[in-house]
Amino acid sequence: MITSKSRKYWLCFGLIAVFLVVDQIVKIWVKTHMMLGEEIPLIGDWCMLHFVENKGMAFGMAFGGDVGKLILTLFRFVASVALCIFLVHLIKKETRTTLLVSISLIIAGAVGNLIDCCFYGVIFSDNYYQVATLFPEGGTQGRFLYGAVVDMFYFPLIETTLPTWIPFWGGNRFEFFDAIFNVADSAITIGAILLIVDQLLSNKKDNEVEVDNVENEDVVENLQK
């Protein structure tokens, strides 16, 4: 018999598995079919694959050299383990599904990028002026835990020059959206947004319950008078 708790286990870890598989398939394809900096238009000039490698955090934010890279990788590992433990705890408590899904998406994104950091430096050749080879003969020059995260989705929806009358930024080039990201980053972003929405709805519901309780107490007190 499949219980509610069992369904939530399947939902959460199935969702994590699906995002991880899709994330890694896209990254491996990009590594083995594109050179660094290469672009492939998908829909005109505003939706494309643009291959970059990111040694920092999500959306290209840097974090300070080899020491920073190692700290970031270890942080991702600790955070992923902690989130998995937290997720299991929530499932055992049979927490609401929206919260479970949000945490699952964040875990999928964190683990997806963690795989790149841990293993890509030692299983792929580099992509400088060439497509990478998986498990190249003679090994690689990379190091375990120091791999770069593969990013590829690029949506420059608006590219323009700001009017000169705008203070400070007038006359400068403006681009929206200029971040380059991957499936794992998307999972983290969607999970974080869903988490915020879940908390807002939960707080609203708690407030409504509290108001109802106060009103019921007032009714009881009036009846007792």
Image (cartoon, grey):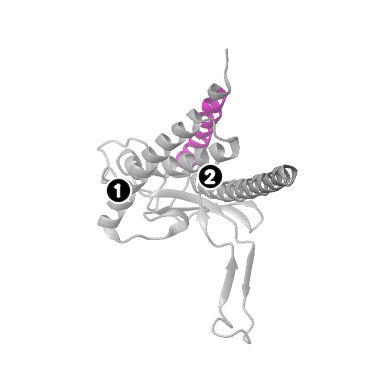
Looking at this view, name the residue that lies furthest to the front: 225
Any mark on residue 187, and which? 2
* Circle 1 residue: 146
Position in image of residue 67 (x %, y %): 25, 56
> In the depicted view, which residue is nearer to us: 27 or 165?
165
Looking at this view, name the residue that lies furthest to the top: 1
User: Is 88 covered by the magenta stretch?
Assistant: no
Mark 1 crowdedness (10 Å alpha carbons): few <14, some 14-19, many ≥20: many
Q: Distance between the residues labelled 1 and 2?
A: 22 Å
Q: What amino acid does circle 1 point to?
A: Tyr
Residue 145 shows up from this direction? yes
Position in image of residue 20 (x %, y %): 48, 36
Position in image of residue 47 (x %, y %): 62, 54
Position in image of residue 197 (x %, y %): 61, 49
Residue found 67% across the figure and 48% down from its top: 208
> In the depicted view, which residue is nearer to us: 125 or 21?
21
Label 1: element kind: loop
> In the depicted view, which residue is nearer to us: 82 or 210?
210
Q: What amino acid does circle 2 point to?
A: Ala
Q: What stretch is highlighted in magenta?
A: 7-28
